[in-house]
Amino acid sequence: MPFWKPAHESVEWLSGVAFFDGFTHDDLQQVVALGTEVLAEPGAILMDQGDTGVDCFVIVEGSAAVRVSGEFVATVSAGTMVGEMALVDHRPRNATVVAQSPMKLLRFDAQQFRQLLDQMPKASERVMTLLHDRLLAND
């Protein structure tokens, strides 16, 4: 079990995260089985611009700064997924993401991310909406 909590507590923990709004109890159990709980302290680099994307995160608690070429572009917080773009388009990371506060994250490696999208239409829909919104914001 990748979580420190018993499975039923992990499902409850994720049920309050905006990214998982509308997911059923069974859906959340699948998410728990796929993901790994990660803690990050302020200043921790979650991903570095230019690196190969090998994982993505759903922010459960805390916030992080997004920087492109060293310039601050956004703050991301609980309920947001980060790092998915590099897994979808198989290109290097387009931003650096650094924890601004203590964070609790749910990590998916590339294989787990593909499973999440393949097995859970609701997760796939959320990721596609997120990508669409980010592409519109970059125009």
Image (cartoon, grey):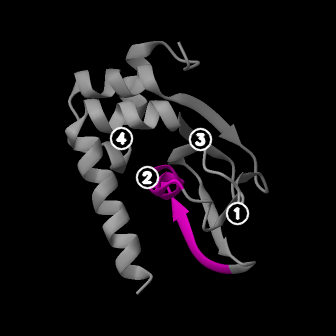
Q: Mark 1 points at which residue?
A: 50
Region in magenta: 72-90
Kindly report the distance in space between the C-alpha atoms of the residues bearing marks 1 and 4: 32 Å
Q: Mark 3 points at which residue?
A: 104
Q: Mark 4 points at which residue?
A: 16
Kindly report the distance in space between the C-alpha atoms of the residues bearing marks 2 and 3: 23 Å
Kindly report the distance in space between the C-alpha atoms of the residues bearing marks 3 and 1: 24 Å
Vertical arrangement, residue 98 with respect to residue 132, above or below: above
Q: Local crowd at mark 4 within 10 Å, few (<14), some, or many (≥20)? A: few
Residue type beneath disc 3? Lys
Of the image marks 2 and 1, the number of the one nearer the N terminus:
1
Of the image marks 1 and 4, the number of the one nearer the N terminus:
4
Q: Local crowd at mark 3 within 10 Å, few (<14), some, or many (≥20)? A: some
Locate the C terminus by quadrant.
bottom left
Kindly report the distance in space between the C-alpha atoms of the residues bearing marks 3 and 4: 13 Å
Any magenta on residue 81? yes
